[in-house]
Amino acid sequence: MKIEDRQFVSIDYKLTLDSGEVVDRSEAGDPLGFVFGAGQIIRGLEKGLLGMEAGQTAKITVEPGEGYGEPQPNMLREIPRENFPADLNLEPGMSFTARGPHGPVAFRVKSSDAEVVLADFNHPLAGQTLHFEVTVAEVREPRAEELASLMQPSSCGGDECSSDGCSSCGCSCGG
C-alpha cells in the first residue's frame, strides 16, 4: 500500500541539520505514527513521503519554507527582567516555557540586561534546512480512534493561527 491522504503511516527517522548535528530521532521499536495529510507533521516531510511503501527508505531534505519557516522578527518579545528569579544567571540560548493565552509556549533567551530579557518565540528549527533519513515502518487504513483524534480542537485558538505553522501565535497546531 502506498502512502496517500488519510492513511495511517509510521516512520523510523533521524533528523539532522546542515552541520550534521542530530536534533531528533525516533526511538528504536517506537516509530512516529500519524495520519498522512492531516497536518500532523511538517509539510516538506509529507511531500517527501508521498507514494512510499512500508519498508522503503529515503533521504528527504526540507527547506525552511516547508519546515518551520524563516525566523520572524515579530516573534521577539521583551520581557521585564523582574519576571525571572533574581538569582538566575540568564544566558543567551536558555529555554523556558511561558503560559500563553492558548496554553504553554516555549521561548529562548536571545539577550538580557538588568531591565529586560529579549525572548525569541520562533520555533528552534526556524530557518534551518532539515535532513531526514526515513524508513517507512507501516502504511494502513487508520483506526477509528486515530481519526477521532483529528476531530479534537487544537491548542490554538481562532484567528491567531496561520497556515505557516502558527508563527503568528507561537503555538504548535501544525500548518
Image (cartoon, rainbow, N blue to C red):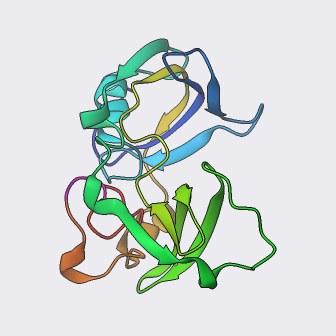
For residue 2, say whether it is visible: no
| Residue 33, image x, y percentages | 55, 45
Q: Nearer the viewer, residue 140 or 38?
A: 38
* Residue shown at the point (53%, 55%) measured from the top left: 111
Please report the bounds of the magenta region as a residue range: 163-167
With 106 as the anchor, is 159 left or right in this view?
left
- Is 61 magenta? The answer is no
* Position of 168 relative to 46 (above/below): below
Q: Quadrant of residue 65?
A: top left
Q: Nearer the viewer, residue 111 or 114?
A: 114
* Position of 83 relative to 11 (above/below): below
For residue 118, say whether it is visible: yes
* Residue shown at the point (42%, 62%) measured from the top left: 172
* Position of 141 relative to 120 (above/below): above
**Extreme residue toward the right, this view:** 87
Q: Quadrant of residue 130?
A: top left
| Residue 34, image x, y percentages | 48, 48
| Residue 149, image x, y percentages | 46, 69
* Residue shown at the point (30%, 39%) measured from the top left: 43
Q: Nearer the viewer, residue 87 or 154?
A: 87
